[in-house]
Amino acid sequence: MLDGLKQRGVKFHSLTEAIDTTTPTGRAMWQMIGVLAELERSLLSERTRAGVKAAKCRGVKFGRKLKLSAAQVAHARQQLEQGNPQQDVAALLNVSRKTLYRALKD
Protein backbone atom coordinates (compact mmCIF):
# COMPACT_ATOMS: atom_id res chain seq x y z
CA MET A 1 0.00 0.00 0.00
CA LEU A 2 2.78 2.39 0.93
CA ASP A 3 4.59 1.77 -2.37
CA GLY A 4 1.42 2.60 -4.31
CA LEU A 5 1.05 5.85 -2.42
CA LYS A 6 4.74 6.66 -2.92
CA GLN A 7 4.45 6.14 -6.70
CA ARG A 8 1.60 8.64 -6.81
CA GLY A 9 3.61 11.18 -4.85
CA VAL A 10 1.58 10.88 -1.66
CA LYS A 11 3.40 11.38 1.63
CA PHE A 12 1.92 10.26 4.93
CA HIS A 13 2.60 12.04 8.22
CA SER A 14 0.70 10.98 11.33
CA LEU A 15 -0.10 13.81 13.71
CA THR A 16 -0.58 11.57 16.75
CA GLU A 17 2.23 9.03 16.22
CA ALA A 18 5.81 9.60 15.13
CA ILE A 19 5.28 8.24 11.65
CA ASP A 20 6.46 10.20 8.62
CA THR A 21 6.78 8.10 5.46
CA THR A 22 9.20 10.56 3.91
CA THR A 23 11.93 9.37 6.29
CA PRO A 24 13.51 5.90 6.51
CA THR A 25 12.53 5.62 10.18
CA GLY A 26 8.93 6.53 9.40
CA ARG A 27 8.75 3.96 6.60
CA ALA A 28 10.19 1.31 8.94
CA MET A 29 7.61 2.16 11.62
CA TRP A 30 4.83 1.94 9.03
CA GLN A 31 6.05 -1.49 7.93
CA MET A 32 6.35 -2.72 11.54
CA ILE A 33 2.78 -1.63 12.26
CA GLY A 34 1.68 -3.51 9.14
CA VAL A 35 3.52 -6.65 10.24
CA LEU A 36 1.96 -6.46 13.72
CA ALA A 37 -1.51 -5.97 12.22
CA GLU A 38 -1.02 -9.01 9.99
CA LEU A 39 0.20 -11.05 12.97
CA GLU A 40 -2.81 -10.07 15.07
CA ARG A 41 -5.17 -10.97 12.21
CA SER A 42 -3.50 -14.39 11.85
CA LEU A 43 -3.69 -15.03 15.61
CA LEU A 44 -7.36 -14.04 15.68
CA SER A 45 -8.14 -16.44 12.84
CA GLU A 46 -6.17 -19.24 14.53
CA ARG A 47 -7.95 -18.70 17.87
CA THR A 48 -11.33 -18.70 16.13
CA ARG A 49 -10.60 -22.00 14.36
CA ALA A 50 -9.39 -23.52 17.66
CA GLY A 51 -12.54 -22.34 19.45
CA VAL A 52 -14.82 -23.80 16.79
CA LYS A 53 -12.93 -27.10 16.90
CA ALA A 54 -13.17 -27.24 20.71
CA ALA A 55 -16.89 -26.45 20.59
CA LYS A 56 -17.48 -29.21 18.04
CA CYS A 57 -15.59 -31.66 20.27
CA ARG A 58 -17.95 -30.69 23.11
CA GLY A 59 -20.91 -31.47 20.87
CA VAL A 60 -22.03 -27.94 20.05
CA LYS A 61 -24.12 -27.85 16.87
CA PHE A 62 -23.58 -24.99 14.44
CA GLY A 63 -26.13 -23.54 12.04
CA ARG A 64 -29.86 -22.96 12.15
CA LYS A 65 -32.09 -25.29 14.06
CA LEU A 66 -34.35 -27.52 12.01
CA LYS A 67 -37.89 -26.26 11.55
CA LEU A 68 -39.35 -29.76 11.56
CA SER A 69 -38.63 -32.53 14.03
CA ALA A 70 -38.26 -36.15 12.94
CA ALA A 71 -41.79 -36.83 14.19
CA GLN A 72 -43.18 -33.95 12.13
CA VAL A 73 -41.37 -35.19 9.01
CA ALA A 74 -42.79 -38.69 9.58
CA HIS A 75 -46.27 -37.18 9.99
CA ALA A 76 -45.80 -35.19 6.77
CA ARG A 77 -44.78 -38.35 4.88
CA GLN A 78 -47.86 -40.11 6.23
CA GLN A 79 -50.11 -37.22 5.16
CA LEU A 80 -48.61 -37.21 1.67
CA GLU A 81 -49.02 -40.98 1.34
CA GLN A 82 -52.70 -40.50 2.18
CA GLY A 83 -52.96 -38.18 -0.82
CA ASN A 84 -53.03 -34.80 0.88
CA PRO A 85 -51.57 -32.00 -1.30
CA GLN A 86 -48.08 -30.81 -0.37
CA GLN A 87 -49.31 -27.24 0.07
CA ASP A 88 -51.86 -28.39 2.66
CA VAL A 89 -49.32 -30.51 4.53
CA ALA A 90 -46.90 -27.56 4.62
CA ALA A 91 -49.66 -25.28 5.93
CA LEU A 92 -50.59 -27.88 8.55
CA LEU A 93 -46.98 -27.87 9.81
CA ASN A 94 -46.77 -24.07 9.55
CA VAL A 95 -43.79 -24.14 7.14
CA SER A 96 -43.29 -23.25 3.50
CA ARG A 97 -43.46 -25.85 0.74
CA LYS A 98 -39.73 -25.44 0.15
CA THR A 99 -38.99 -26.22 3.81
CA LEU A 100 -41.19 -29.29 3.55
CA TYR A 101 -39.40 -30.40 0.37
CA ARG A 102 -35.99 -30.03 2.05
CA ALA A 103 -37.11 -31.97 5.12
CA LEU A 104 -38.53 -34.79 3.01
CA LYS A 105 -35.40 -34.97 0.86
CA ASP A 106 -33.22 -36.07 3.82
Image (cartoon, rainbow, N blue to C red):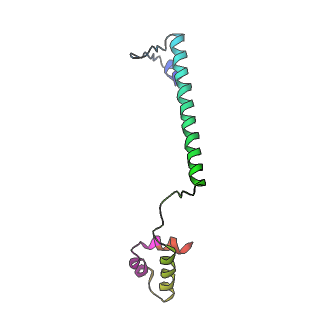
Residue 30 or residue 68, whichever sits in front: 68
Image location of residue 98, percent across then percent down: 46, 71
Name the dominant secondary structure of the magenta segment: helix
Q: Is 82 placed above or below 14 here?
A: below
Image location of residue 37, percent across then percent down: 52, 29
How many marks on residues?
A: 0
Q: Is residue 19 left or right of residue 46?
A: left
Q: Is 47 placed above or below 89 here?
A: above
Image location of residue 83, percent across then percent down: 47, 88
Question: Which residue occupies 58% across, 54% down?
Answer: 56
Residue extending furthest toward the bottom? 82
Q: Is residue 94 left or right of residue 27?
A: left
Question: Which residue occupies 44% across, 74% down?
Answer: 97
Question: Which residue occupies 49% across, 72% down?
Answer: 69
Is residue 93 in the magenta section? yes
Q: Which residues are magenta?
A: 87-99
Image location of residue 20, percent across then percent down: 46, 13
The quadrant the C terminus occupies is: bottom right
Is residue 90 in the magenta section? yes
